[in-house]
Image (cartoon, grey):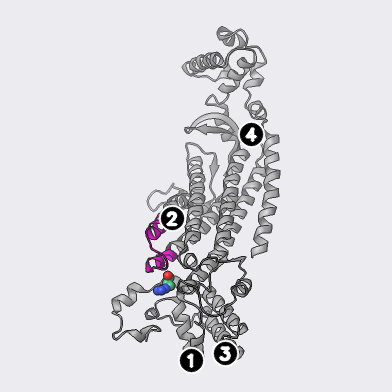
Amino acid sequence: MKLWSGRFSKSTDSFVDEFNASLPVDKHLYKHDIRGSIAHARMLAKQGIIAEKEAAQIVDGLEAILREIEDGVFVFDIADEDIHMSVEMALIEKIGSVGGKLHTGRSRNDQVALDTRMFLKDAIVEVNAEIAALQTELTEVAKREIAAVMPGYTHLQRAQPVLFSHHMMAYFWMLRRDFTRFKACFKHADVMPLGSAALAGTTYPIDMDFIADELGFKRVSNNSLDAVSDRDFIIEFHAASAMLMMHLSRFAEELIIWSSAEFSFIELDDAYTTGSSIMPQKKNADVAELIRGKTGRAYGNLMQLLTTMKGLPLAYNKDMQEDKEGMLDSIATVKNSLIGMKGMISTMMIHSEVMRQAAEGGFTNATELADYLAAKGVPFRDAHHITGVLVKKAIEEGCWLVDFSIEEFQEQSLLIEDDVYDVLNIDNAVKRRNVRGGTAPERVREQIEKAEKLLEKEERWLDERK
Ligand code: ARG
């Protein structure tokens, strides 16, 4: 029998039982549901709404149900609809009608908002822990390979030489922004809605601050209608996840390109690659490809929930039950993608000689020559043109700029002197980019130090919430 069967004279169609149920999804929220109910029962007793003895019975019953679920012996019945009613039914079965007092002053509408907020807060801490772990790994790789030079690209054409460590640290800063975006989501999820009841607030003298304290919430909601209608915190989680996955996807794409035979800048470890069932020579970057591919899920989940929420009148509507599947999916997607990325980064082999050769070729030092002429008073546009002519000549002759004799340089400009060879040297080109945030080794070291301080800050944020 349903907990709400009083006004019905027929039982639900079995199709409706299945279609209506969220249990297969929200049973994953069992721990938070039970913790929330325990806090609620204690509050009811403290406020004299139920007797202490009754609350103690309810709490014991809930704890026993928690153990049963954890031991895998609890039987979920789809006809119970959702985790809230599964637990409540089981409680009444276990301790008798006193179990029916648990739902006093509460509705499933504020209960589901509470559970989801608690669940997502925990998930955000786990996601941010994985972000920090990947950031730590990037910092380690950057330190280990501080001096390796590679071509930097624009339009995927060789542009200017950069340090490989600089390239790795670029992802550190993207992840830093992701971390702060998830922190902001945490703050918006950290609002305790219980007491809003179905929509209008409860008539019982409940103590919202007590529940917030018990469950580790910083704030309580200010408007009962908003509190049961709000899913912004999940949408924000999706938005932050979509952005994070976009970053990881770009990184994955680079790893795929770099590990191709055509580039050979890196080799991914055997443990993070897979073979082909037909081509014996293949070693495929499946983990990177899946991270890139799974990005679509994160975007999809964001679109799904935005669309589900659009146009819903206040307050609760059953449409909102569609919020949890995507949430669970995005949590798993981002966590696994971060773990996979960290695994690839920490085990990959870096071919710094190949990178250096690529950086020495491809005219990545052409800007150096233009800057050199400009420094001697040639207007930059003319310097650009002279250099372009020399590049064209080199391409025709099948050589690089450094292969020209000083006479050949001087055919284009008499201002070019012997010191041009130092200027064209790619290590010097890197060193000279000594602006804040530039690729000069000194600046990359400075970046890494700053990054390590931020990592300590992130660890403190995580420690306070674990
Ligand atoms: N299973 C529901 C959900 O996930 C819980 C809230 C149901 N409330 C209601 N009035 N039907 O959204």
Helix, strand or loop under label 4:
loop
Q: Mark 3 points at which residue?
A: 54
Q: Distance between the residues labelled 3 and 1?
A: 10 Å
Do tag 2 and tag 1 residues touch (Cβ < 8 Å)?
no
Asked if 257 appears above or below 225 in the picture, the reply is above
Where the C terminus falls, by quadrant?
A: bottom right
Asked if 354 appears above or below 98 in the picture, the reply is above
Asked if residue 316 is among those painted magenta in the image, a careful observer would answer yes
> Residue at horizontal 48%, vertical 33%?
156
Give the prevailing secondary structure in the magenta stretch. Answer: helix
**Could you tell whether 349 is left or right of 234 in the image?**
right
Magenta part of the chain: 302-325
Return the mark for residue 97: 1
Do tag 3 and tag 2 residues touch (Cβ < 8 Å)?
no
Q: Which of the two labelled residues, at mark 2 and mark 1, occupies the earlier sequence position?
A: 1
Check disc 1 and give the amino acid type.
Answer: Ser
> Residue at horizontal 43%, vertical 51%?
293
Check disc 2 and give the amino acid type.
Answer: Leu
Residue 3, image x and y in percent?
Answer: 40, 84
Q: Name the residue under label 2.
A: 302
Label 2 beta carbon within 8 A of ligand 1: no
Q: How far apart are marks 4 and 2 (CA)?
A: 36 Å
Q: Which of the two labelled residues, at mark 3 and mark 1, occupies the earlier sequence position?
A: 3
